[in-house]
Each structure stands twice: as structure tokens, then as C-alpha cells.
Image: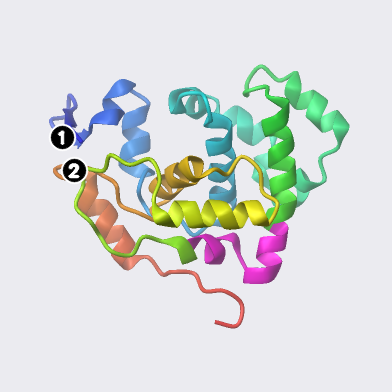
Amino acid sequence: MELFRADDGLLRCQWCGGAAEFIPYHDKEWGFPVGDDVRLFEKLCLEGFQSGLSWRTILNKREAFREGFAGFDLGKVAAFADQDIERLLADPGIVRHRGKIEAVINNAARAIELKEEFGSIAAYVWQFEEREETAAPRTRSTSPQSIAMSKDLKKRGWKFVGPTTVYAFMQAMGLVNDHAEGCASRPLAQEARQRFARPTGLGA
């Protein structure tokens, strides 16, 4: 993975040189561990929307997605009805794809089931963490862990959670540190992962 040197002189992962808005996302979010259920659910949903599109498109629409999907509140989204689907299909601020909109509503209900079983979405997804730190660069778009999580989520009735989508989610939420060797954020993400208290499930 090549590196990108920004105007501030710092070396970063090459991909964040593609757009100005990528730099703060890369520096403050991507690859840093997340244990908050709302953020985890939101990211899984947004990665599903990204399928076939660019992350820049989704990132620029993220606030509109949050507004349209009630802040990704599980209970509220799971209760969305036909009129909510039609409202979202008429919203130019988001990606208007009926299948993906319906998948978010379905997945909210499935996420509630996960919380009932594991105590939190975080406790579930962090089971699939890639624990061993391996040297970047990465050229893969999936991993054994993302394949396993994708397969299990699909068994549980989730939609738009293929292994590539799940791997992108894992990269972003810090379940793996895929910052390139030499990237200024790689050691920071690693330190954050070392400090991060892994969530435990019910009865753990």
C-alpha cells in the first residue's frame, strides 16, 4: 500500500488522498476501535449502502442518512413502515435504493435480536476481531474473520452483509488495523486497540 503525503507533511494511507474529506475521517475514525452499538450498526448499514458506489458518496451523505434513519436508533428503525420507506425513497440526501433501505429496517430488527442474545452488538462483532497484528500493506478485500461474520449474520437474517462489506466495516471500526506501514495513524490505531476494553457478552 503506497503512502500519501498531505500538505501538513504527514504520511497517510494512499486512499485518503482521493478527497479532502477523507483526511479527517482517516485520522479520527478509520481503524480506531469502536464499542458503541449505534456507531457499529450505522457503519454496517452505510457499508451496505456503499455496495457498488464510492465511500466518498456515502461519507458526504452521512448526516442525511442519520437524519433519515432516526439516528440509527434500533427500535425506531425496526418500527419503520411503508410510509417511511416511501419518505426515504423521496429523500435526495441519501442513496435511494429500495432494497438497501428495506435491508436497514430488517437489520435493525435483527440487531435487536443480537443484543438480546449477546448483550450488545459490540459483544457480538468483537468476537470476530483479528487479534494478531500483521504488517501492512494489505491487498485483500476479505478475511477469514469477515467471511465468518458475514456467513453468521446471513444465517441470522441480515441483508447486504457480504464478506467484502463486512471486511470494510471491520477495517473502519478497528477490528483490524489496516493502516499502511509508515502511515502516521497506524501506531495511534494500534495504541487505541491495545487500550480498548473488549466488550463481553451476557454471562461472560
Q: Residues within 10 Å of mark 2 (few under 14, many from 20)?
A: some
Task: Give 36 or 151, whichever is nearer the viewer.
Answer: 151
Q: Is residue 200 above or below residue 108?
A: below
Residue designated by label 1: 10
Q: Residue at the location (31% across, 59% down)?
A: 192
Residue designated by label 2: 184
Q: Residues within 10 Å of mark 1 (few under 14, many from 20)?
A: few
Residue 126, image x, y percentages? 47, 63
Q: Is residue 93 left or right of residue 198?
A: right
**Disc 2 and disc 1 in contact, CB within 8 angstroms:** yes
Toward the right, the furthest residue is 82
Which quadrant would residue 23 be assigned to in this image? top left
Name which of mark 2 and mark 1 comes first in the sequence.
1
* Residue 142 in view, yes or no: yes
Q: Quadrant of the N terminus?
A: top left
Q: Could you say whether the residue bearing mark 1 is in a helix, strand or loop?
A: loop
Q: Could you say whether the residue bearing mark 2 is in a helix, strand or loop?
A: loop
- Magenta: main secondary structure: helix
Q: What's the amino acid at mark 1?
A: Leu
Q: Is residue 143 above or below residue 196?
A: above
**Magenta range:** 112-126
